[in-house]
Image: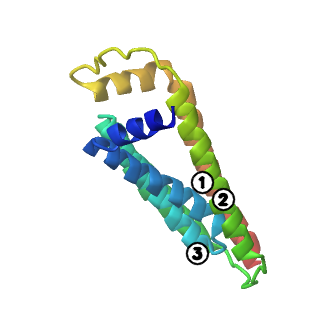
Amino acid sequence: MLSNYWHNLVNYLSSGSNWTFLIFALLAISGAIFMISYTKVVHMVMSLALTFISLAGLYVLLEAEFVAVVQVLIYAGAISILMIFGIMLTKHKNEEVETKQTLHNILLIIGSLGFLGILFYAIQSATFPEAGKLNAGADNTFEIGKLLFNVHVIPFELMSVLLTVALIGAIVVAKREEE
């Protein structure tokens, strides 16, 4: 039974696309862990940008190039720049937060490895139905545009209003701190 798991792992790691997936997945997970572990906001934003770029790499592996480019332009570019802009507008006190960082890191590594082991066991034990051939179409950008501006037009507009309100809120908070 255990040798079957090792055999499946060796078969999985024999493909280059699986190695690429593992690298991008580990970068995305590492960026997310660094995002919640760092105490300086600039380091958090850079970790978040690493996560966003890694997700774009995963989208390329899924042959969703348009979504990958949008991921890099919107999230890794614009949102990260907007966050850095917000950081520069506000004043930050230079207070050192004293924590038990080594204990936190050890527990984080143990928890992550335990979760990885449980997840690997669950995936190896699961039975998945046979996947059909994906028919993405000749122009998936056109299809995404049709869906975005026909079916999902209300959430799209609500998201633009939300981002505008967040920008105005950041400016108001920055102005209040100056006074």
In what element is the residue under mark 1? helix
| Viewer-nearest of discs 1 and 3 | 1
Which residue is painted at 66% across and 59% down in the image? 110
Tell me the quarter of the picture where residue 150 sits: top left
C-alpha distance separating marks 1 and 3? 37 Å
Residue at the farthest left position: 138
**In the picture provided, is 157 more to the left or to the right than 18?**
right
* Residue 78 visible in image: no
Mark 2, Cα crowd under 10 Å, few <14 / some 14-19 / many 20+, is few
The C terminus lies in quadrant: bottom right
Q: Which residue is mark 1?
A: 113
Determine whether 98 is above or below 1 in the image: below
Asked if marks 1 and 2 touch (Cβ < 8 Å), the reply is: yes
Question: Looking at the image, which residue is at 60% across and 67% down?
Answer: 86
Q: Mark 3, residues whose alpha carbon is within 10 Å: few (<14), some, or many (≥20)?
A: few
Q: Position of residue 44 (x, y in %)?
A: 58, 67
The residue pinned by badge 3 equals 88
- Write down the residue under mark 2: 110
Q: Amino acid at mark 3?
A: Met
Q: Do the numbered discs 1 and 3 sit on residues whose CB atoms are within 8 Å?
A: no
Q: Is residue 25 left or right of residue 138?
A: right
| Residue 97 drawn at (x, y percent) | 77, 79
Q: Is residue 107 above or below residue 122?
A: below
From mark 3 to mark 2, how far is it between C-alphas? 36 Å
Give 90 or 56, whichever is nearer the viewer: 56
Residues at marks 1 and 2, CA–CA distance in whole angstroms: 5 Å
Disc 3 or 2, which lies upstream in sequence? 3
**Closer-to-camera residue (26/83):** 26
Which residue is nearer to you in this view: 126 or 34? 126
Name the residue located 58 percent from the left edge and 64 percent from the top edge: 34
